[in-house]
Image (spheres, coloured by chain):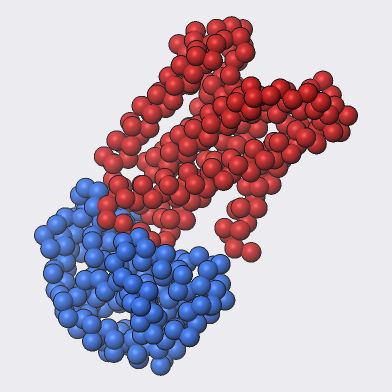
Chain colours: A red, B blue
Amino acid sequence: MSTMEKNVKLKFLILLLGSIIFCISYWGGQHDFFTMLLSSYSYKGTILLLLGIIIYNAIDIIKNINGNYLYLCRFENMQAYYKRVIIEVIKSNLKILLIFLLLIIAFSIFGCYNNYNLPTTFYGLNFIIIVIYYTIKLAILCILFSVITVFVYSSFKNIGIAIYSLILICCALIDNSQEDIVISKITQFPINYIEYLYPHEYASIFYDLIAFVLFVSIILVIISILKYICFKKRGDILE
Amino acid sequence: MKIKIENISKEFKGNLILNNINLELQESKIYGFVGPNGSGKSVLLKIICAFYMPTQGRVLIDGINYCDGNKFPSNLRALIEKPSFIPDISGFENLKLLANIQHLISDNDIENTLNIVNLYEEKDKKFYKYSMGMKQKLGIASVLMENPKIMILDEPFNGIDDKSKKKLFEHLIKIKKDKIIIISSHIFEEIKKICDEVYYFENGTCVKK
């Protein structure tokens, strides 16, 4: 079995484990399928696990490209190199996200059937819109965090990734559930990404959208700074 | 075309791998870099490709300094260490993937190159089924196929049969006009037959042999 095949299987197993953890945490029958599915999208444990895999996968792809001299010598400049790396990382991470979502859906169905709590009511168009909205948010964050990983790893290698992971864990663990208006949280916890993963029922969708856009803007500024550092500080591509 | 290597030194975590190397490589010549393992040959090749930045000095290709800024040398192809290809697709498809990065050549050009390295018959075989010699030949084909001005071949003849080696030697001599070809090896006898100039590397320094 090649290293690449081993890595793919490892990532899948971690995702599977994450979904099982989620299901066990929500086991109990108090939730129906729809509530369970919606909760799963923003469940801290699984989101952290997903981000962990996204970071690991990005590093794996960068190492693969950097180890391939036949590929490297065909790039004209660093811009072309980073463009290719980022495209490859995003493509691969979106596939991981898709598997993650399918596992979450599968386990949500399984969980409900196990508790004899079958989805008897269909919430209609509203439910579909909310699910699409969740998924788009998660996909955008997945892309942005992938890009940050590429620049952090290229500039600061493993130490940078360790600090970056620590920041993400801290941001996920911040609990600001006492607040009841989404917009006020933006100033308090500007990088608490879990908050921006689900629409808040107690605030209007408009405020939720503004909160998310502001959050994405902050990440884009961080990406621009990292990109500048990366191009400014041209070091060895190879390790 | 000219490659000028000026005062190149390279350190890794305090270990001096290359110590003040100065070389001038002219076109229409095949250069040999010989030396024991760990003598710094591959590191210098990676610096020429701009994969490594030197601790000191610079590499000028036609007057352009590639140790400064974000550019890679254009028209350079390199086979360094073991070639990395995708195992689940054929040799031909692997070359096509590489050729598609810059879209410089056609499928016919790829097939002609596979013929030169004696791999045409196996072109549709999956890469993971290739023997070590066949993998090496595919790596050489990836360097030759786009007819670059600078060719870098690091230990290219490992595991290649004598018949194919002879054919490759003849081909390299035939195409060397207007090109700079650098071949590295730890066996002097192997490359002295085709090289116009040979440099010997030891303990981070290099001398003309």
Where A232 falls versus A22 (above or below)? below
The residue at 37%/63% (across/down) is: B100
**Corner quadrant of residue A223:** top left
Q: Is residue B40 visible?
A: no
Where B197 falls versus A25 (above or below)? below
Q: Nearer the viewer, residue B97 or A192?
A: B97
State left or right for residue B91 relative to residue B103.
Answer: right
The residue at 45%/74% (across/down) is: B92
| Residue A134 image position (x, y, % from top left) | 58, 27
| Residue B142 image position (x, y, % from top left) | 37, 72
Q: Is residue A224 visible?
A: yes
State left or right for residue B185 relative to residue A144.
Answer: left
| Residue B127 image position (x, y, % from top left) | 52, 73
The image quadrant where one finds the N terminus of chain A is bottom right
The residue lying furthest to the front in this view is A125
Where A28 falls versus A184 (above or below)? below
The residue at 33%/32% (across/down) is: A224
The residue lying furthest to the left in this view is B63
**Corner quadrant of residue A180:** top right
The residue at 88%/29% (across/down) is: A116
Q: Nearer the viewer, residue A157 or A53?
A: A53
Q: Nearer the viewer, residue B32 or B9?
A: B32
State left or right for residue B126 relative to residue B160.
Answer: right
Label tally: 0
**Corner quadrant of residue B116:** bottom left
| Residue B208 image position (x, y, % from top left) | 19, 77
